[in-house]
Amino acid sequence: MSFQDEQQRFYEAARAGGLADVERYQWYHTVDLGNGLVTPGVYDYRETMSAFGFPEDMSGMTVLDVGSATGFFAFEFERRGARVVSMELPSLRDLDRFPGQSVESSLRKIENMMHKSEPYTERDLYWYLLEGPFRYCREKLGSKVERCYSTVYDITMERTGVREGFDLVFIGDVLIHTLYPLKALAALAPLCRGQLVLAGVLPEGPQEPPAMVYIGGADAENDEVAWWHPNLSCLMQMLQKLGFAEVDQVGFHKGALRPSGYEFERVILRATKKRS
């Protein structure tokens, strides 16, 4: 079945189930909701989960999914038995912006990236991009995944409601959308009592010495809310300095965006906390 056929099938089923404005939603992840209902996500991780090295049985574990979006990973962790906290921004105003860039300019960039012809209000943009798709999937799955609203810099155990810390912290394509990647990792490190798994883009070229490649360009109106590609040794050394005794390269995750077919590759790192 083509992506377009899958999308149309989902639209028809969702409308029949009461989701009248389904075409306005942005489905970041492909999520199987059961009974033949599958969200037409841009990223489909269903066949490549083994690349991440997550335990098949996560019973008794507490997991933080950072930048959860539609929630594929959060729901998968829950399916494997974990208690899961899904962290997402309180609003799109909390997205990092290049110094001097206005909130309105940042919002319009996101709207253009969604390929929507009609203008959205700020509230609608947040709902159709982040909150609406997640809530729809959680309801259809009968999920108990908990939602925490915070920027990555401001996250604390108190905000998550898990005061004893997390056995696993997962951070996917988030660092690329931060102006301060080290500050983001430094905020997450104290919340992790076990392992942190990070998936992200590596820059082309040498992975030594430790460095970050700037990808934001010179035009404040022309970036994709992305600024930095830390290289492999940079990521590994930052994690080690933040208290992770072992940092291993698990491998790579490869796939293609839907429906464009644009191929992508992400390195997967597993950082393990020092034992006290």
Image (cartoon, rainbow, N blue to C red):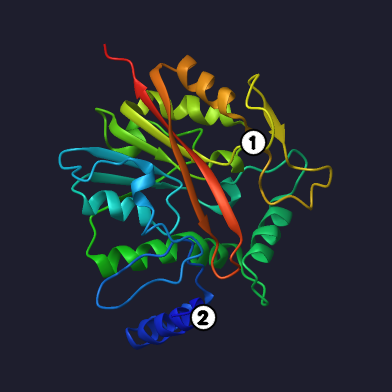
Q: Quadrant of residue 132?
A: bottom left
Q: How many marks?
A: 2
* Cα distance between the residues tagged 2 and 1: 32 Å
Residue pictured at 83% horizontal, 47% vertical: 219
Q: Amino acid at mark 1?
A: His
Residue underneath mark 2: 4
Residue pictured at 29% horizontal, 40% vertical: 63
Disc marking residue 193: none
Q: Quadrant of residue 193?
A: top left
Nearer to the camera, 114 or 128? 114
Nearer to the camera, 215 or 45? 45
- Asked if residue 21 can be seen in this view, the reply is no
Residue underneath mark 1: 229
Say whether residue 38 is left or right of residue 84: right
- Asked if residue 166 can be seen in this view, the reply is yes
Q: Position of residue 95 (x, y in %)?
A: 59, 46
Please identify the quadrant where the C terminus is shown.
top left
